[in-house]
Image (spheres, rainbow, N blue to C red):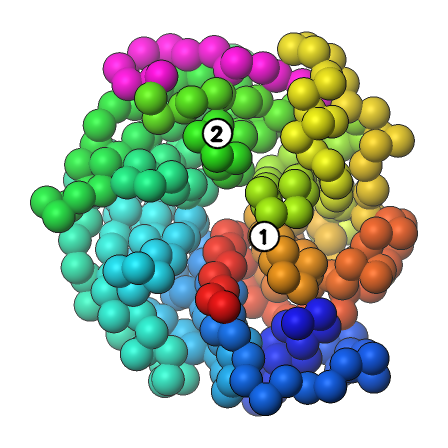
Amino acid sequence: MKNYRFYLMSLATVGLMASCSNDDDVVDNTDDDMPGEMDRAELYVTSGSSGNVTVYNMGDTPSTTTLNTNSSSNEGVFYDSSNDELLVASRSDNRINSFMGISDMLMEQTADLELNISSESDLESPRKIAVNGNTVVVADNADVDGDDTTDDGRFFIYTRSEDGLMLRNTVIVDFAVWGITFNGNSLYAVVDKTSDLAIFDNFSGTFTADEEIMPTKRITIEGIVRTHGIAYDSDDDVLVMTDIGSADSDSDGAFHFIEDANSKIAAVEDGGMLSVSEQVRVEGDNTFLGNPVDVVYDEESENIYIAEVANGGGRVLAFDDDDYEAGGNISPIVNNELAGANSLFFHEED
């Protein structure tokens, strides 16, 4: 499936999305024959500007669908294919909203989502969603203690059942939060305003009360200035973390690609550093990276997708492994404008 994702994503945006780079058309399919039937593959992208969810459908019939959620700002998204359900964290309503019947709506250019269920308005500043079974975790970066000179954040932990989305408990950490992802039962969380990664082993089973908690291990990812986005893929054992650099700059962003992530992280002691020599860093003016706030990895094609919120007012970028594995100042192979792009979820089916 290598390179087809880019080809289909480019087709999906023709006439629907404004491209600010000719990179959309630079796709090398000369080494492979186009398949007769593509797997289902979609990239879901939320926006803090419109509240819409943009879906790039990279399946048999490439298309782009705009899903209207009735929120004015969203950040945090997850698609559950077993229930055909989309979970979206609403920043305007401070809650998680659930929408059903998503696959049928992808046939349309635009569609109005009908609310299925919602959590209570427990949240204050939701950023990202991570899901493990029936546990839904939301990273919330609102100031917990009211003192902006101290860093803190919260994880809201919900249980998803037939009865809805119920807040199970809330835990407080002594660092600012942003991106989160699960590696098995362990929660990986970026430590905002730093270059650190916090790991909470057996997160759902261990942290079951309203309390302040400490990570099982916290390490520094050398070379990152300020991390935000994180993605882990268990099949390829790949970890990707983004670096927004200065929040005021729209051109100093980057991402780090780490292969054999489990063994490399295990070899670093609590409080230690993962050497930049064991990573690949992508940065530079050709990348269009300024504030890359979220990232996903497609293990089948090995594509990396980025939600870039600052450069050009918002972009969805895609990078090919033939380029990013060398690191440096590379160009994205897909570069589409999307105002306020801030979180991603990639779904595929064999």
The image quadrant that residue 168 belongs to is top left
Residue pushed farthest left?
163
Instruction: Identify which residue, 259 or 241, lies in the foreground.
Output: 259
Residue at image point 36% right, 85% down? 108
Residue at image point 20% right, 68% down? 114
Q: What residue type is labelled 1?
A: Val
Residue at image point 40% right, 32% down? 140
Tell me residue 110's x, y (percent): 36, 80
Kindly state the secondary structure of the residue where label 1 is placed.
Answer: strand
Which portion, as a residue range, is magenta? 206-221
> Is 258 positioned to the left or the right of 171 in the image?
right
> Is 118 positioned to the left or the right of 322 in the image?
left
> Is 326 positioned to the left or the right of 267 in the image?
right
Tell me residue 291's x, y (percent): 66, 47
Pointer 1 residue = 296
Q: Is residue 81 above or below residue 6?
A: above
Pointer 2 residue = 187
Tell me residue 234's x, y (percent): 58, 43
Quadrant the N terminus occupies:
bottom right
Q: Which amino acid does label 2 sit on?
A: Leu
Kindly state the secondary structure of the residue where label 2 is placed.
Answer: strand
